């Protein structure tokens, strides 16, 4: 659109200029604050609008000090620059943005190789907005495969599909079961076992089981679930009963840790029963929030009727997603990070993060006030609770007091059968350096004398003590 009118006929209306091209009312003064819950009557200058939003966001917590989140809070400036260059590209428009689509395809291929797909060319996968969407897609594929096998009796009143999982799964699996009308069969925690028991999971399976979920890295304590043992228990079940139950591995975090640090651990497509795997690129994939990945062993594992087709460079590009429009920034950032680090770079970054987790866990355990549940030797995550003889404070007091120094450390209770157990959890990510870890420990040690002098735990409202929810 030209900025100047030029020649026009008398009956031609004046041309309008985009309001964003100029300051809004540059000679005016603000006499009152704009409304918060309705659109303002008139525009604001961009500098004014920026400052209002910027100042309000200053009251957020510092993301780098957030030890509750698994999500990446630091990337290199070059990655940020690439993301800025791609934020206006819509990922779904693969015909218009063929190179972005190609980078997505390469990421899927790289993950298929990383997770030991028997035939890398046969593996299928896609990017998502995160692991929650990826889990929904994997669950949909499991249900559709089961419905195909049971078309003679489903749908019917007597054939209600179910999904077997540990009670420690992320809430997205409960959402999947609710949204897609699947019964959630959950293995409870028992004693010092904080995740799924393979034999107990197999015993919950029947002819209506669409699959079993194994979590490679529980959000409750950072421990890996025994994927190979679960597959073995389901193999034995098939030998006894003929039931063939596929496994989905929710590797939201661990699928980007184990390949680099636990190479001898068999959890991925090397196990024939594993049909699909998901991960969060924005967790230990080391990308800012907004990207996940879902992969299936082969085309048989992902029913064709769930896949849409778009024209891509004159060919056929399959797409499978719940979300439609989204920016290409995060996928480009994922490819950049894969290219930037390679296997050895990822190994070094993840090993450094695990080293920090182990060191911090060890020093907290040595204080005498706490008991460690895990030590950060699987996911770089550990959980701890107060020692049995500590009566003056609880984990909610510790979480509340650490927040005063800017540290966000969640305190929460465990699920049924271990609701008596309340813990603190520390997530160590790339960017939580040894120096930051030392500062965290110094603040914790500084608070302990005051906490020890309390007459009793002071936190009455545990829900208000922490905003953390699984």
Image (tube, rainbow, N blue to C red):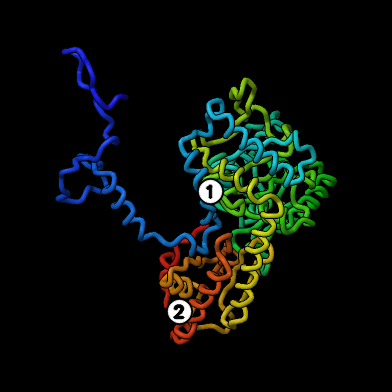
Question: Which quadrant of the figure has residue 422?
Answer: bottom right
> How far is disc 1 from disc 2 in space, using C-alphas?
47 Å
Q: Is residue 356 visible?
A: yes
Vertically, is 411 above or below 230? Answer: below
> Which residue is denoted by mark 2 in the rendering?
457
Which mark is drawn over residue 240?
A: none
Q: Are marks 1 and 2 in contact (CB under 8 Å)?
A: no
- In what quadrant of the picture does the N terminus appear? top left
Pick whichever, 295 or 245, lies toward us.
295
Q: Position of residue 294 (x, y in %)?
A: 64, 41
Pick whichever, 125 or 329, lies toward us.
329
Looking at the image, is mark 1 or mark 2 nearer the viewer? 1
Which mark is drawn over residue 78?
A: 1
Identified at 58% across, 63% down, the residue is 428
Pick whichever, 67 or 188, lies toward us.
67
Vertically, is 441 above or below 463? Answer: below
Q: Position of residue 191 (x, y in %)?
A: 67, 69
Rate crowding at label 1 as few (under 14), some (14 to 19) or many (20 or more) other CA atoms within 10 Å: few
Q: Secondary structure at mark 1?
A: helix
Vertically, is 92 above or below 186? Answer: above
Q: If you read the primary sequence from the N terminus, does the residue marked by circle 1 or circle 2 appear first?
A: 1
């Amino acid at each position: 659109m030209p900025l100047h009118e030029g020649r026009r006929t008398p009956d031609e209306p004046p041309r309008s200029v985009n309001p964003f091209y100029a300051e809004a009312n540059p000679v005016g003064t603000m006499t009152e604050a704009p409304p918060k819950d309705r659109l303002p009557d008139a525009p604001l200058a961009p500098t004014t609008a920026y400052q209002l939003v910027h100042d309000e966001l200053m009251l957020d917590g510092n993301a780098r000090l957030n030890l509750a989140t698994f999500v990446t809070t630091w990337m290199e400036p070059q990655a940020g620059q690439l993301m800025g260059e791609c934020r206006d590209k819509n990922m779904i428009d693969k015909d218009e943005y063929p190179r972005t689509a190609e980078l997505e395809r390469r990421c899927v291929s790289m993950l298929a190789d990383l997770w030991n797909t028997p035939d890398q060319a046969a593996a299928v996968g896609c990017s998502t907005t995160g692991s929650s969407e990826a889990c929904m897609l994997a669950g949909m594929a499991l249900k559709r495969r089961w419905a195909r096998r049971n078309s003679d009796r489903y749908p019917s009143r007597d054939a209600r599909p179910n999904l077997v999982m540990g009670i420690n799964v992320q809430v997205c699996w409960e959402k999947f079961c609710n949204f897609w009308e699947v019964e959630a069969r959950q293995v409870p925690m028992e004693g010092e076992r904080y995740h799924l028991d393979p034999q107990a999971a197999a015993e919950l399976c029947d002819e209506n089981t669409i699959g079993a979920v194994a979590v490679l890295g529980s959000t409750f304590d950072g421990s890996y679930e025994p994927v190979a043992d679960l597959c073995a228990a389901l193999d034995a079940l098939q030998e006894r009963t003929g039931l063939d139950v596929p496994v989905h591995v929710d590797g939201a975090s661990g699928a980007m840790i184990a390949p680099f640090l636990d190479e001898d651990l068999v959890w991925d497509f090397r196990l024939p029963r594993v049909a699909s795997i998901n991960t969060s690129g924005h967790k230990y994939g080391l990308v800012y929030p907004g990207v996940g990945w879902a992969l299936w062993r082969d085309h048989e594992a992902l029913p064709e009727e769930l896949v849409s087709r778009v024209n891509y460079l004159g060919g056929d590009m399959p797409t499978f997603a719940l979300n439609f429009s989204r920016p290409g920034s995060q996928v480009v950032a994922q490819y950049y990070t894969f290219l930037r680090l390679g296997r050895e770079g990822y190994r070094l970054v993840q090993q450094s993060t695990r080293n920090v987790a182990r060191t911090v866990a060890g020093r907290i355990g040595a204080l005498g006030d706490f008991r460690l549940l895990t030590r950060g030797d699987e996911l770089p995550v550990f959980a701890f609770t107060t020692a049995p003889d500590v009566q003056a404070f609880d984990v909610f007091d510790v979480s509340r007091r650490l927040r005063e120094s800017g540290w966000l450390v969640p305190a929460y209770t465990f699920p049924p059968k271990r609701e008596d157990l309340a813990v603190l959890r520390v997530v160590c990510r790339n960017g939580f350096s040894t120096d930051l870890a030392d500062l965290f420990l110094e603040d914790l040690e500084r608070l302990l004398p005051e906490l020890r002098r309390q007459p009793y735990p002071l936190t009455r409202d545990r829900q208000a003590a922490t905003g953390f929810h699984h």
